[in-house]
Amino acid sequence: MIAVTVRAPFLITQAAASRLRDGGRVINISSVFAARPSPQALAYSMAKAAVNAMTQAAAAEFGERGITVNAIAPGWTATDANAAARDDPALVAQLAKDTAAGRMAEPADAIGVVSLFASPEGTWLTGQYVEANGRFRHS
Amino acid sequence: MPGPEGAPVQQCTGATRLELLELAQCVQQVPLVPDQGPAEQQLAAAGLHPSLHDRARSSAAAIEGAGAIAIPVRARLEEPEAIDALFAALDAELDSRTGTAEFDILVNNAGEAAGARWRARHPRRSTA
């Protein structure tokens, strides 16, 4: 868990730092659990909180090169990584209930914020953690 | 796509929304695939979806079709040496295609979602 979710993005960001052009972008996929840790997903919560800490530190580190570093918390998204949840009607219903928007997230729901992070309009946006998840709150 | 000095650049910053989604999916999918042996067997042995590598390749093809560069690289991210190898492969391929190993955007998307609950791991000690 920590090796894949924390150490890998750290090592990759470190390696990427010498390859990213000035004005580049680092976009970290975080989780709602980073800011709202849950005993149901303790290690995951800890791991994603570490990703948020890295996001802020890297934003400070790379800022003078015009590289922005941001994180998005997409909520429970219907991908293969969440297949067990996606394919469980009871859990899908629960997730819908726990989301102000009334449904589980689709991958495309992350596009707007990720695009903003990546775009020229995102130049002044750095070190941020954005919960783009239809206001999901795990119950 | 030619850059200011005639060298091709990885055209991510100007990518459309769809391309960014594809990029995110590609980045998510590629690093999870073990880099050895017949893909399907290795994937099955690792408990991974056998179509993952195919999907990574098709995402990469979609990104290429949109005019950007996408290089699928397989690596076991829990192994630091595999990350070194990932960048070595990326450097070589990117440099041969663009004349530089530089790129514009990094998306850290791979992760492991297993829960690792707290509650079940700390039974009360008996005070008797």
Image (cartoon, grey):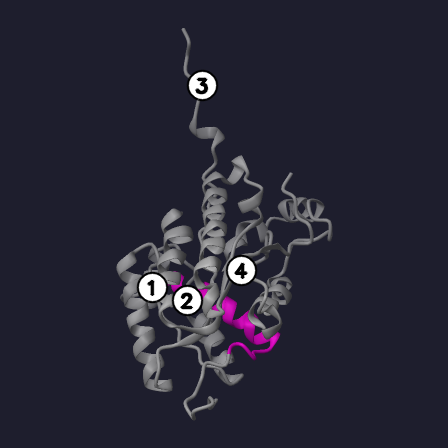
Which amino acid type is marked by label 1? Answer: Ala
Question: What numbered label is drawn on residue A70?
Answer: 4
Image side of residue B88 versus residue A82, left or right: left
Alpha carbon of mark 3 to alpha carbon of mark 2: how far? 43 Å
Label 3 marks a residue whose chain is B
| Secondary structure character of the magenta stretch overall | helix
Label 2 marks a residue whose chain is B
Res A98 → quadrant? top right
Question: Alpha-carbon neighbours of circle 4 within 10 Å: few (<14), some, or many (≥20)?
Answer: many
Co-location on one chain, circles 1 and 2: yes
Q: Which callout, 3 or 1, points at the residue further toward the start of the chain? A: 1
Image side of residue A114 versus residue B109, left or right: right
Whether residue B38 can be seen here: no
Magenta residue span? B12-34
Q: Is residue A36 above or below residue A24?
A: above
List the single residue furthest toward the top.
Answer: B128
Which amino acid type is marked by label 3? Answer: Arg
Q: Position of residue B23 (x, y in %)?
A: 50, 71
The residue labelled by disc 1 is: B75
Question: Alpha-carbon neighbours of circle 1 within 10 Å: few (<14), some, or many (≥20)?
Answer: many
- Which of labels 3 and 4 is toward the front? 4
Q: Position of residue B33 (x, y in %)?
A: 37, 63
Alpha carbon of mark 4 to alpha carbon of mark 1: how far? 24 Å
- Which of labels 2 and 4 is toward the front? 4
